[in-house]
């Protein structure tokens, strides 16, 4: 954990060329004019303006999906849009760190290189990034003990190392880092799971997201946003899971 946070900070302080100001619009027009029309009219002109999810949340969802799918071509534009929409450099750094565990170290490392360029172009330095080992948020001991016991009973004899790191690194460290709110960590996690087609992990994390403050209309809009950035098949695979979670939650 400490190593990754230090690595992100070091990359952000390294001199880098200016970040690309936006998607390659001329390339889209020359190679796929209909794609550019959908981008302007439907995606940026309509989806991003839907009222049940803020531009800040849409930015978090989109950045998480792009990192989870290792789609770095559009990442400079959407990191810039995230900053313009109120996502802080600290939060972007934490999103990348978080996704090292939920979408893989390589995807996070690739995103770090892109973020370095975006930060450098905006003169964002290390003083605007999170500490490697900050004081952690309070732990809900009862809830964590219940989660740890359940996972230990299910998988303790199958992969004890995974169970150990899940407790020690993910839920007693990563999820308690203070520069990304629990609701936003949940938003990042759910977005990455849908983008990667990992719907088996969705019930726990979608419920956790809603326990952390994500409303059902917001969760529905997360899926709408992800239809464009993760593809319709991944979202339609996630819809029955979301429906089941919504129906089983107390009203």
Image (spheres, rainbow, N blue to C red):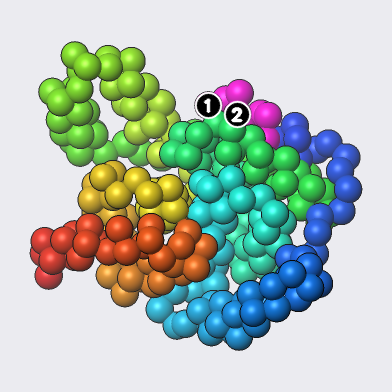
Q: Secondary structure at mark 1?
A: loop
Residue displayed at 65% across by 62% down = 78
Mark 2 crowdedness (10 Å alpha carbons): few <14, some 14-19, many ≥20: some
Q: Which residue is mark 1?
A: 1
Q: Is residue 250 left or right of residue 148?
A: left
Quarter of the figure with residue 247: bottom left
Image label count: 2
Image coordinates of residue 121 in percent, x first then y, are 84, 54
Q: Look at the numbered discs 1 and 2 and tell me whether their residues touch, using CB distance below 8 Å.
A: yes
Quarter of the image containing the C terminus?
bottom left
Horizontally, residue 116 falls left or right of residue 242, namely right
How would you rate the neighbour count of disc 1 (Cα within 10 Å): few for under 14, some for 14-19, many for 20 or more? some
Residues drawn in magenta:
1-8
- Tell me residue 1's x, y (percent): 53, 26
In the rendering, at what x and y percent does residue 134 appear?
Answer: 54, 33
Q: Is residue 203 above or below residue 49?
A: above
87 vs 199, nearest the viewer: 199
Q: Main secondary structure of the magenta part?
A: helix
Kindly give the residue lying farthest to the front in the view shown.
31
- The residue sitting at 23% across, 51% down in the picture is 203
Dot 2: element:
helix
Residue 123 in the magenta stretch? The answer is no
Q: Which residue is mark 2?
A: 4
Left or right of residue 153, residue 203 in this image: right
Is residue 127 shown to the viewer in this render? Answer: no
Q: Residue placed at 57% from the left, 25% from the top? A: 2
Q: Is residue 174 visible?
A: yes
Residue 157's place in the image compared with 21, above or below, is above
Measuring 61% from the left and 50% from the top, which residue is drawn there? 71
Give the CA distance from mark 1 to mark 2: 5 Å
């Amino acid at each position: 954990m400490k190593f990754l946070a230090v690595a992100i900070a070091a990359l952000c302080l390294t001199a880098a060329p200016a970040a690309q100001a936006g998607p390659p619009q001329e390339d889209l027009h020359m190679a796929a004019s209909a794609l550019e029309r959908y981008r302007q009219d439907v995606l940026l002109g309509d989806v991003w303006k839907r009222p049940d999810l803020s531009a800040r949340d849409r930015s978090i969802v989109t950045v998480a999906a792009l990192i989870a799918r290792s789609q770095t071509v559009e990442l400079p534009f959407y990191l810039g849009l995230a900053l313009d929409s109120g996502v802080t450099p600290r939060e972007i750094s934490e999103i990348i760190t978080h996704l090292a565990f939920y979408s893989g170290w390589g995807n996070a490392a690739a995103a770090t290189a892109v973020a370095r360029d975006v930060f450098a172009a905006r003169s964002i330095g290390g003083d605007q990034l999170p500490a490697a080992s900050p004081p952690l948020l309070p732990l809900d001991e009862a809830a964590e003990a219940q989660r740890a016991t359940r996972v230990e009973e299910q998988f303790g004899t199958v992969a004890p190392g995974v169970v150990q790191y899940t407790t020690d690194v993910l839920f007693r460290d990563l999820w308690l880092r203070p520069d990304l709110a629990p609701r936003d960590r949940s938003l990042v996690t759910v977005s990455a799971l849908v983008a990667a087609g990992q719907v088996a992990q969705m019930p726990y994390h979608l419920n956790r997201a809603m326990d952390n403050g994500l409303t059902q209309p917001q969760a529905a809009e997360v899926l709408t946003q992800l239809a464009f950035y993760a593809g319709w098949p991944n979202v339609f695979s996630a819809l029955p899971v979301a429906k089941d979670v919504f129906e089983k939650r107390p009203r």
